[in-house]
Amino acid sequence: MAIQSDLIISTKDLTKTYGRKPVVDKLNLAVPRGSICGFLGPNGAGKSTTIKLLLGLIKPSSGNGAILGKNIVNDSVAIRERVGFLAQDPRFYGYLSARETLRFVASFFFKGSPIAIENRIDEMIQLVGLDGKADRPVRGFSGGERQRLGIAQAAINNPELIILDEPASALDPLGRRDMLQILESFRGRSTVFYSTHILDDVQRVSDTVVIMKRGRLIAQGSIQELLAGDRSQFYLTVRGDGLTTRELLKSIPWIKTIVLEEGLPDVDNNPTTKLQINVTNPNVAENELLRIVMMADNEVVVTEYGRVSYELEDVFVDLVEEATKNGS
Ligand SMILES: Nc1ncnc2c1ncn2[C@@H]1O[C@H](COP(=O)(O)OP(=O)(O)OP(=O)(O)O)[C@@H](O)[C@H]1O
């Protein structure tokens, strides 16, 4: 397959079938270099299987892929030298301390003098917030501490790409927040590709997202692009029942639908009505909509106006529902 140098991960029709069931189905991934990419999908979507395919831990049934320009089937050893990985359920030797664990991992691929290794271990221990605990046996570590150690071991060799399988899902809200901060700290140093089913996490730290459902890719790209996908919804809140405004806007050709709903009371506690306006021409609407209402010869008082913005959750639910309707 052709390799695009701005992509750190790319796949072409990557497929894994167990029995007759495709668990990963003709997946075409394109993950840009330097991004923090959230790999999102409901339970059983095929995220872990995809990650295993990317790392050469299992073989594709068909299709192919490249990481750092190397073939995921033929060059998996070379890939693992340059990619850090945290498994969904990381296992450690309980009798080793965190520092000994990192030393052990570094002994495989770390390139540098013994002093450089020790410095890097110290740096990682600090980065993941395990200072003070680094010399205790791992068997006594909490779930959050184990995940921190897992990230430190994934990043010890200064990899260009770090792949993490659900690094935050099993943690409590504080643990998740810390984990996301650690991921954020890799920005500008490594590309991070991490799977999760928690939308909020993706919205908080990722700049790109891949969304998968039942083995199929249903969306990928920058979060900004995804959230800006539907620019055709505006809202306008007016004092009173909104009927005059609806009459005024009804005949405008670029307005498709107007839905009225009760708004929040204004600052003087007067009732308001929110008009949800769907337009066919967002650019014209942006310039004209408010002006038309304000210039009309009536008593309408506008208390709020804007373009409807979306949370990732709305987009995700829409995409997953659409994919379900289309039979994915
Ligand atoms: N070795 C296997 N043999 C048969 N089926 C498998 C195997 N590994 C995974 N599957 C099935 O493939 C589907 C996808 O599993 P996978 O673990 O990749 O999903 P996931 O998106 O990572 O889910 P989760 O968020 O729950 O971890 C599931 O239905 C799972 O049961």
Image: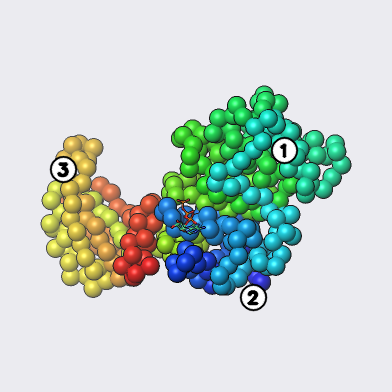
Work out which quarter of the rendered image holds the N terminus and state it: bottom right
- What residue is shown with label 1? 102
Badge 3: residue crowd in 10 Å (few <14, some 14–19, many ≥20): some
> How far apart are the alpha carbons under marks 1 and 3?
62 Å
> How far apart are the alpha carbons under marks 2 and 1?
36 Å
Q: Which residue is drawn at 61% across and 46% down?
A: 86
**Amino acid type, callout 1:** Leu
The mark lying in front, picked from 2 and 1, is 1
Instruction: Check disc 2 and report its element: helix, strand or loop.
Output: loop
- Residue 312 is labelled as none
Examine the rendering and report whether any part of residue 208 can be seen: no
- What residue is shown with label 2? 1
* Contact (Cβ within 8 Å) of mark 3 with mark 2: no
Instruction: Check disc 3 and report its element: helix, strand or loop.
Output: loop
Horizontal and vertical percent position of residue 171: 49, 37
- What residue is shown with label 3? 271
Examine the rendering and report whether any part of residue 172 can be seen: yes
- Is 75 on the left or on the right of 129, as rendered? right
Q: Image height check: is 92 above or below 195? A: above
**Amino acid type, callout 3:** Pro
Horizontal and vertical percent position of residue 16: 52, 66
